[in-house]
Amino acid sequence: MAHFINSDCAGCGVCAANCPMQAIYTSDNHYYEVKPEECIDCAVCESVCPTGAIQQA
């Protein structure tokens, strides 16, 4: 299952910069979201997130 980013997101972009599939994008509210159809569930984003905002769906 794909990961998701909760409201604890600080908008820093570390997750997007480290995603090997480029499956994380900036949403209209300037925070980040995961494209579930492109996420390979590698958990790199979860491991680099400084706020712990990324979780497995």
Image (cartoon, helix red, strand yellow):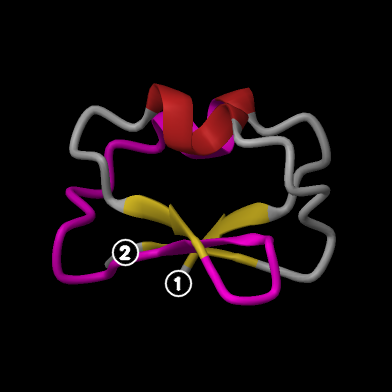
Amino acid type for the residue under numbered disc 2: Ala
The magenta span reads: 27-47
In the rendered image, which residue does mark 2 sit on?
2
Task: Work out whether mark 2 precedes mark 1 in sequence or the reverse, and give the earlier one.
Answer: 2
Give the main secondary structure, helix, strand or loop, of the magenta stretch. Answer: loop
Q: Position of residue 10 (x, y in %)?
A: 83, 48
Q: Does 20 lie within the magenta span?
A: no
Q: Residue at x 23, y 55 (%)?
A: 39
Q: Position of residue 4 (x, y in %)?
A: 50, 66
Left or right of 32? Residue 3 is: left
Q: Residue at x 67, y 33 (%)?
A: 49
Amino acid type for the residue under numbered disc 1: Ala
Provide the secondary structure element on which disc 1 rests: loop
Looking at the picture, does residue 22 appear above or below residue 56?
Answer: above
In the rendered image, which residue does mark 1 sit on?
57
Near mark 2 (Cα within 10 A), the count class, few <14, some 14-19 or many ≥20, is some
Left or right of 48? Residue 45 is: left
